Each structure stands twice: as C-alpha cells, then as structure tokens.
Amino acid sequence: MGQLNRRALLRQLQKLGVASRAELAKALGMSQPTAGKIVDELIATGVLEEIEVAEAGGAETGVRGRPGRKLRLNQSRSRLLAIQLGLQETTVARLSLGVPPADEWHFTFALAQTEAQPARAWETSLRAAARAIGGRDFLGVLLSVPGIVDETANRILFSPNIHWTEKADLAKIVRRVWDLPVLLVQEERALALGHHLAHPECEDFLLVDFGEGVGGAIIVAGRPLANPLPISGEIGHTPVLGNPRQCGCGAVGCMETLVSLRGLLESFAAATRGKKHSWSQLREHIAAHGIEPWLAHPLDAAATAIAGALNVLGLRRVVITGSLTELPAAVLAHLARAVQDGSMWARFGRVECVAAPRRRTAGLIAVGIDRLIVPDSPPKKDFPKNGAPKVGRVKFSC
Ligand SMILES: [Zn+2]
C-alpha cells in the first residue's frame, strides 16, 4: 500500500505541478497524517522539495501548519541521466524530476556511418559524455532507443534502422560507463508519456512521430496501452500498395519509406528531375508551391494508416510530432483532413489531429519516477534478463 500511495501522490503532483500537503491529501482522499508522512519521506530522499509560494493577496491564510509552503518534484538537483540513441546522433542530458519546458540536451555525438565496431565506438563516446556531464547524484539512466524494445527484458529485439543495437547489450555498455541502473525505453513511448506529462488533460491519444523513421505510441486513460507483445504503434511499417521502396525492416513498401525525412527528400528529388535537395529547400518549395502530388501521396498513405489505427483502437485524437511539424501548416492541414476522411468517428463526431513538440525528456522522467523511485519491486543495480520490474501494467486511480 505504501508504494501505491507514494506513486499516487507523485502522479498527482506531476499533474498539479505545485501543491500544498493539504491539497494533496484532499485530491488523493488520504488522511493528512498519511499524506504528510509520505511527503516527509520523499523530501528526505530528495524526490520532493518545498518552496515558498506567495499566497493570493499576500495575506496569511490562517491555515494551520505552513502557510505559503508548497511542494513540487525536485527541480534543484539533477537526479536522472537521459540518453537518446538516434540514427544520426546520440544525445545526453542531466534531468531533474520536474517537467522541463522543452527538451534540452547537454552532450551530442555521432558515429561514422562506416564505423566497423559501432558498439565499441558508442561506448568510447559515452565515456567522453560522462567526463563532460559529471555528477554522481544520479538515481539511474534512461536510454531512449528506436525499434522493437522489450522494456521488461531491457533489450532491443529488432531495430530496422540501427541493426547493430540488436546484438549489443546496450544496458551493459552504459553500466560500464555509469555504474547505475539502466532502463531502455522505446523512443515513441517516451514521446507519448512526455506529451501526457506536459498535458495531463490529454488522456487518450495516438502519437505519431515523423523523423528518420515513422513510429507511434498509444496512451489510454493516461497510461501506455497494455498489449501482449512488446510491440505496438509500429504504424510506419504499414504497407502501401504500389510502393516499391525497400524498408530497413526487410519488407517492401512500408509507409515510412515515403514519409520519413529520407523518404520525402527522395520523392522531392524525383519530382524535381532527380536533383538532391536539403530539408530546408524542401520546406521552402512547399511554402511556394503548396501540396503537390509528390507530397500529397505520402501524406495520404500516412493518413490511411493513422485512420485505420483510430478505427481499430477507438481513439479520436492524434498527436503529430517531429519533422512534419517543421513544414508549412498546409502539410499538417492536409494530413488532418485525410485522417478525418478515413476515420469512422469523424462521420458523426470530432477527430482531432494536432501538432506538438517532442517531449522526450519529460517522458523519460515519467519512466524514471515510475520505475526507479516508486517501482513495483525494489530497483536492482544490475537489471538481469526477466528481472526488471514491469512498466505500464499497473493502473492507478488518482
Ligand atoms: Zn518497414
């Protein structure tokens, strides 16, 4: 019960941002002594901090205890280390437990595409990151990775765009650099949890991220959708009829080969007599010419897959992050219209398709709090196979 109460209290505080002890006890339906005891314990361990908040009107409220003193998740100390492994580069950040206003990375490195021993080179670069980042106050490391990730077993099963990560034990590599618990988090899942943390009122949605690949994640009732296999949201690998492009996953015709950064640049080049262009040239071209057929087709393919997911999952809200949000607004408007055309719910109800910034670090903080600070079972320094606590299967009513 203690752990459930702690978790409920932390979730409530994430939602409220700042709250007094009395407000927390009331919102959770706990007695004030129970809530107070949990709060004291979480302050002692550096998870929460007390701050002075000016009361409305500046007057003493007469409330017994500590008028004007409120609680929030500790924003004064870096308690978590985040690593984002991407196709082009790896970024590293120190994180406090508060929700950051935007993603901010403190160290970035890239491996050569021709690197013969990528795992070893990655470890060497991480050591450089450790020297630059410093700090020994971390509770653990959250590692955001693409591909099919078994978060329970802490390993990557399949990675269409970074195959070397399937064989390398990434958690072990990171532990050799930082002797701390390491948790692998599927990258779109981190984005979806981050979006939810930044917008707690947004409880049910499909997030689709466009970038080097196209992936999704599903949040239902504020939690990642529980499903039997360690795979979900792989919307980018929906086949598009007549699309001859080879995908990194081994199949032919996947939607992401059309709408990823590379896919769009390829179509743009083909439409402009094979000339290679940059992403900013593509953006300027769209601003000047609108949605031409070379762009409409990939967008319609993406919308078809998204609408299919909405129809199957029973969702009516889509959050779009990543490269498509950097393009002129007409692009998102076209996609949103096509999603509505394919959604059954839109025939009589409202289907939303909104753009949002990537909130990856916020998502990693949410996972860190859930699995390192208030885990189902005590955190182990060395998560063995099958030994890591489960995530996303426990449902709380706050
Ligand atoms: Zn594919």
Image (spheres, rainbow, N blue to C red):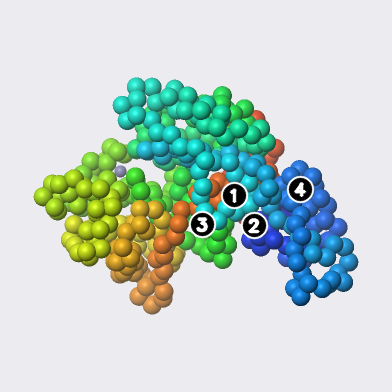
Q: Earlier in the sequence, mark 3 or mark 2?
A: 2
Look at the numbered disc 4 and say if its residue's Cβ is closer than 8 Å to ligand 1.
no
Q: Position of residue 221 (x, y in %)?
A: 56, 61
x, y percentage for residue 336?
34, 66
**Residue 355 picture location, percent across and down:** 41, 62
Which residue in the structure is indicated by mark 4?
42
Q: Which residue is mark 3?
A: 195
Question: Crowding at label 2, few (<14), some or many (≥20) Cα neighbours within 10 Å?
Answer: many
Position of 160 relative to 193 (above/below): above
Q: Secondary structure at mark 4?
A: helix
Mark 2 = which residue? 14
- Evaluate whether residue 123 shows in this view: yes
Q: Nearer the viewer, residue 319 or 218?
A: 319
The foreground one among 82 and 77 is 77
185 with respect to 279 (left or right): right
Task: Kindly identify the amino acid type of the residue bearing the numbered disc 2.
Answer: Gln
